[in-house]
Amino acid sequence: MSVKEIAVMADIYQENDRVAENIRQNLKSKGVYAVNLIGAPGTGKTSCLIRVIEGLKGVGCSVIEGDIQSDIDTEKLRLMGISAVQINTGGACHIEAVQIQKALEKLSLEEKSLLFIENIGNLVCPAEFDIGEDIKILAVTVAEGSDKPYKYPLAFKKAGAVILNKADLLPYVDFDADYFYKGVRALNPKAPIFKVSAKTGEGFDEVCAWLKSAL
């Protein structure tokens, strides 16, 4: 029985990876750089996304929003004039490549632009699935605690960058920065770590400059 289960999972990953690679090549042909934004619920992924897009003046940005239910964040982005499409998984804990493929049919992407995909709030499954992105950016917060790299190693290992949000709360929470950074670096020696506050705007100039260089 266990062998059959492994075979089924292998088939699921293989098909997902095939679709994801097609997406990546199609976006690359248009000069579109795709960012898969992952993180737990409440990390402020959408708030960080808004700060980044506001800071990327002159750069075309589009968003695919992933949620189990609702389109609250998508409507918020649209009211700001940002091109956004909603994906609702109906209970699934992550977005899959085929869902991105369908969502892209509803977007008109500019050449040499950025596509942000805000994944489902989860630190496990989204780290496992390739959805055609060029990079995964992991959002965490000081309020979550400094032990997250040790508890969710795959998410940190696969991150091309880490955004440490809610830095404005540092005086009020028990966050061991040395322990956190040591954990991240043991898993991922190269990914930049940006300490930011979506509330105050602290740190987002550096994030935007880094994304512009990537684009």
Image (spheres, grey):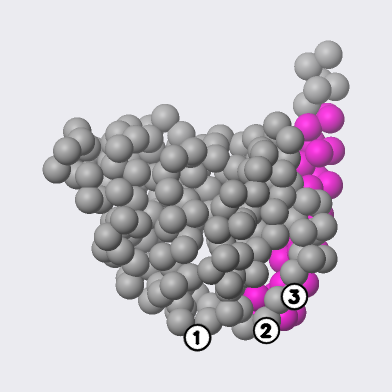
Which of the two residues, 74 or 115, is positioned nearer the viewer here? 74
Residue 132 visible to an observer of this rendering = no
- The answer to which image quadrant residue 124 occupies is top right
Disc 1: which residue: 58
Which of the two residues, 134 or 54, is positioned nearer the viewer here? 54
Q: Position of residue 179 (x, y in %)?
A: 24, 38
| Mark closer to the observer (2, 3) | 3
**Label 3 element class:** loop
Disc 2: which residue: 111
| Residue extent of the magenta highlight | 7-32
- The answer to which image quadrant residue 122 occupies is top right
Q: Image point 81% across, 39% down: which residue? A: 12
Which of the two residues, 37 or 76, is positioned nearer the viewer here? 76
Give the distance between the C-alpha atoms of the residues marked 3 and 1, in whole angstroms: 17 Å
Whether residue 21 is in magenta: the answer is yes
| Quarter of the figure with the N terminus | top right
**Which label number is shown at residue 108?**
3
Q: Position of residue 149 (x, y in %)?
A: 38, 38
Ranked by sequence position, the earlier of labels 3 and 1 is 1
